[in-house]
């Protein structure tokens, strides 16, 4: 058992100073048919530890939402799942992360191949400064997924259709992707991610820079995509987590506190920190 | 305020309303802002004036170098004077006294000149180079032997300077011209047998001791070859170094040391690079001296730091989100660099290369150390022909005693500036084409 560290107290959460982190996340962190499984995961940035002993399973074709106050490490954990953290200097991940039973941090697992299986959508829409077509076709071309132009055309069309963007852009595929609106750009990024048919999609606050209408479109899209993909989404909006996810994981300063059915987390949280967060006592 | 006899300003302020105080300070702020803008405009005007002064000075001094005084003479290809019996014998042609027929032509034009000194004066009216032109004409057309033709021949540099300055307010520049010579020019002018023509020689010839024969082509070609070597070596090496340091190298003491050293190298006086080039390329690797190859190598060393520093800045300016996006869809680190970072950083890298090349084009000091300051008459035809470069040519001509070289110097500066403008324009067009929004 560890005591709640200083930073929380500094935020004025004096009422919480006697709260202790659970050794093991409360609720149901494990799943039988898991796509991704994390055991004793610790993440360090140099000397600073960002994630403490996280154990969680992500089930096949589920949408799991990760919530928690800023700086709680949810994005860090997400980026560890497809080894995006490899590019961050001084970042060390320990513990066991397995995708379909394969450890993703062994030397046998190529990070490039892993990222083809686990796609990612980022906080800020980041289309390449290329045409809409090339944005979507980039991944398939990279991995040699299409041998002929017609095949590539088909991949582009299906990806854009699935991302709900086809009807809006089908007449201007040769125009720059950067010329689209923010919401369209983000859907383009989702199309780009699904064009390489990943098994899992990680979304790091995908709607944080979008207006409510664009957000609604992305949320609809997530619901549709969950039929074929396993999705992990980090979000700051509790309403969004409640709307799109099957399960919700609550993180607090690097510790996984509670994982439960989304409805349960938001109606009857088991842990008092979760309750404090969702009732808005801090965050 | 006026009714406050002993009241301080502070007290007066107290009596004013808030808006009044703000209005007063506003007027003061606007005045300050106006002054501030004035300083900026003054700085720009000063800069523009300097540039205008420079250009008017150079152009007014140099534009006459693009024209050359020619004298009309009737020349007879007298086989006896030439000493040629068979035009197909190259040795006879080479030894032929073509200057002799020019002298004969001058003697015929100005009859009654006697005395060694006067004759020498007369023969000096036409340039030494005229003989070569006549030889070329005769070789091209064998039927001209023992025939006569009327030709415009290049005048000597003293005549050229005198003739060009005849119309000026201060009167003609006499210099070494004797009264007699001036009289001849007078005669020729009245007979319309002397005129200014476009100076083709200046653009097609190499250097010469005779100002009327000296051309810029040798130096221009030398500069071109040197710069080709420089850009071919420094751009790829600089970009490769920048990409490795920015994208792949770990951050540790060694890379810090390398960075500090690169920054220091950018500030090293260029003559040091000349010494380095002399020691390494010429003394150790035995690259021939005075050739564009070694000049290019030395200038590569000199421009590398500039290109590396600006390329690194350009790479740093590529948004990390683009890199993340590429990594996210499974691009390998090399693919990230080749597909995204380099295309986006290219305009910035080009800017660095332009600055580096402009610097290299104007560089004299390091080239002095590797023998590119030699007097070279032939126009270089490749990277290993001895040559000189434009700024060195300017230096050499500025150093020459003949009056006519003064205008050549200014003309060479104009050529150098034109070279620079053409190069920069090309680079800017190229950069604009590559520029993309993100």
Image (spheres, helix red, strand yellow):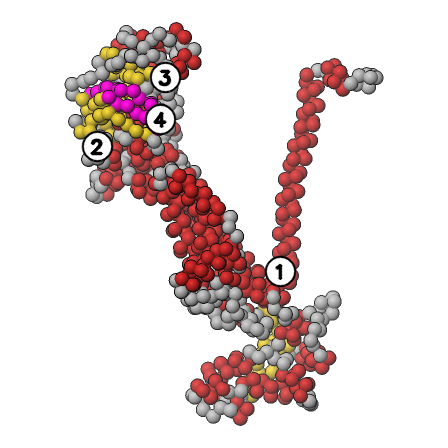
Magenta-span inclusion, residue B260: no
Q: Nearer the viewer, mark 4 or mark 1?
A: 4
Nearer to the camera, A133 or B263: B263
Q: Is residue A262 left or right of residue B93?
A: left
**Residue ID for mark 1:** B59
Question: Percent x, y for residue B231?
Answer: 42, 55
Which secondary structure lies at badge 2? loop
> What residue is shown at x 24% (from left), y 25% (from top)?
A95
Mark 2 near mark 4, Cβ–Cβ under 8 Å? no
| Alpha-carbon span between mark 3 and mark 2 | 31 Å
| Alpha-carbon span between mark 1 and mark 2 | 71 Å
Q: Which mark is residue A226?
A: none
**Residue ID for mark 2:** A106
- Residue B197 seen by the camera: no
Question: Percent x, y for residue A9?
Answer: 41, 12
Question: Percent x, y for residue B99?
Answer: 56, 84
Locate the N terminus of chain A by quadrant: top left
Which secondary structure lies at badge 1? helix
> What residue is shown at x 62% (from left), y 52% (from top)?
B51
**Residue ID for mark 3:** A69
**Residue ID for mark 4:** A47
Q: First in sequence, mark 2 or 4: give its number.
A: 4
Question: Percent x, y for residue B311?
Answer: 43, 45
Which segment is the magenta one? Answer: A40-64
- Residue B279 seen by the camera: yes
Nearer to the camera, B386 or B42: B386
Nearer to the camera, B285 or B19: B285
Locate the C terminus of chain A by quadrant: top left
């Amino acid at each position: 058992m560890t005591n709640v560290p200083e930073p929380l107290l500094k935020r004025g959460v004096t009422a919480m100073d006697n709260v202790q982190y659970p050794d093991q996340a409360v609720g149901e962190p494990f799943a039988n048919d898991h796509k991704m499984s994390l055991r004793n995961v610790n993440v360090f940035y140099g000397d600073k530890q960002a994630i403490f002993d996280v154990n969680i399973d992500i089930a096949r074709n589920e949408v799991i939402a990760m919530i928690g106050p800023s700086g709680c490490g949810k994005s860090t954990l997400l980026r560890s799942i497809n080894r995006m953290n490899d590019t961050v200097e001084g970042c060390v991940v320990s513990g066991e992360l397995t995708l379909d039973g394969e450890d993703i941090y062994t030397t046998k697992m190529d990070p490039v191949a892993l990222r083809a299986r686990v796609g990612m959508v980022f906080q800020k829409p980041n289309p390449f400064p290329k045409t809409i077509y090339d944005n979507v076709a980039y991944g398939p071309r990279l991995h040699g997924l299409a041998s002929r132009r017609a095949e590539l055309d088909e991949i582009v069309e299906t990806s854009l259709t699935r991302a709900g963007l086809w009807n809006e852009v089908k007449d201007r595929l040769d125009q720059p992707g950067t010329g689209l609106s923010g919401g369209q750009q983000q859907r383009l990024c989702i199309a780009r991610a699904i064009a390489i048919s990943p098994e899992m999609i990680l979304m790091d606050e995908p709607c944080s820079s979008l207006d409510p209408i664009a957000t609604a479109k992305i949320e609809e899209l997530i619901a549709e995509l969950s039929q074929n993909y396993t999705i992990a989404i980090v979000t700051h909006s509790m309403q969004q987590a409640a709307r799109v996810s099957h399960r919700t994981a609550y993180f607090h300063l690097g510790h996984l506190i509670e994982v439960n059915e989304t409805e349960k987390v938001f109606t009857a949280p088991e842990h008092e920190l979760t309750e404090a967060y969702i009732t808005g006592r801090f965050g | 305020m006026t009714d406050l006899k002993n009241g301080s300003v502070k007290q007066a302020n107290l009596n004013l309303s808030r808006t009044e105080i703000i209005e007063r300070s506003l007027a003061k702020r606007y005045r300050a802002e106006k002054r501030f803008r004035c300083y900026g405009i003054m700085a720009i005007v000063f800069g523009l004036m300097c540039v205008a002064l420079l250009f008017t000075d150079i152009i007014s001094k140099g534009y006459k170098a693009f024209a050359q005084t020619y004298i009309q003479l009737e020349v007879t290809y007298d086989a006896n004077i030439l000493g040629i019996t068979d035009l197909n014998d190259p040795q006879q042609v080479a030894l032929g006294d073509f200057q002799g027929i020019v002298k004969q032509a001058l003697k015929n034009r100005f009859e009654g000149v006697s005395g060694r000194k006067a004759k020498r004066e007369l023969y000096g009216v036409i340039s030494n180079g005229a003989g070569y032109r006549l030889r070329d004409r005769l070789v091209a057309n064998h039927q001209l032997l023992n025939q006569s033709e009327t030709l415009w021949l290049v005048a000597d540099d003293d005549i050229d300077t005198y003739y060009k300055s005849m119309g000026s307010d201060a009167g003609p520049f006499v210099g070494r011209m004797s009264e007699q010579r001036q009289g001849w020019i007078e005669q020729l002018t009245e007979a319309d047998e002397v005129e200014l023509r476009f100076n083709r020689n200046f653009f097609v010839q190499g250097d010469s001791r005779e100002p009327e024969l000296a051309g810029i082509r040798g130096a221009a070609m030398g500069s071109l070859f040197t710069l080709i070597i420089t850009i071919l070596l420094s751009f790829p090496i600089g970009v490769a170094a920048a990409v490795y340091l920015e994208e792949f190298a770990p951050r540790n003491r060694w890379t810090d040391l390398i960075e500090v050293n690169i920054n220091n190298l950018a500030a090293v006086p260029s003559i040091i690079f000349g010494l380095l080039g002399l020691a390494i390329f010429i003394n150790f690797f035995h690259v021939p001296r005075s050739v564009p190859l070694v000049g290019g190598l030395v200038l590569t060393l000199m421009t590398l730091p500039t290109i590396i520093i600006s390329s690194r800045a350009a790479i740093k300016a590529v948004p990390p989100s683009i890199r993340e996006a590429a990594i996210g869809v499974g691009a390998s680190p090399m693919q990230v660099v080749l597909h995204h970072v380099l295309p986006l950083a290219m305009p910035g890298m080009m800017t660095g290369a332009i600055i580096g090349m402009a610097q290299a084009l104007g560089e004299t000091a390091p080239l002095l150390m590797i023998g590119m300051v030699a007097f070279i008459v032939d126009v270089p035809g490749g990277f290993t022909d001895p040559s000189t470069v434009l700024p060195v040519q300017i230096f050499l001509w500025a150093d020459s005693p003949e009056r006519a070289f003064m205008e050549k110097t200014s003309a060479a500066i104009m050529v150098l500036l034109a070279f620079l403008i053409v190069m920069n324009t090309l680079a800017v067009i190229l950069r604009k084409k590559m520029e993309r929004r993100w």
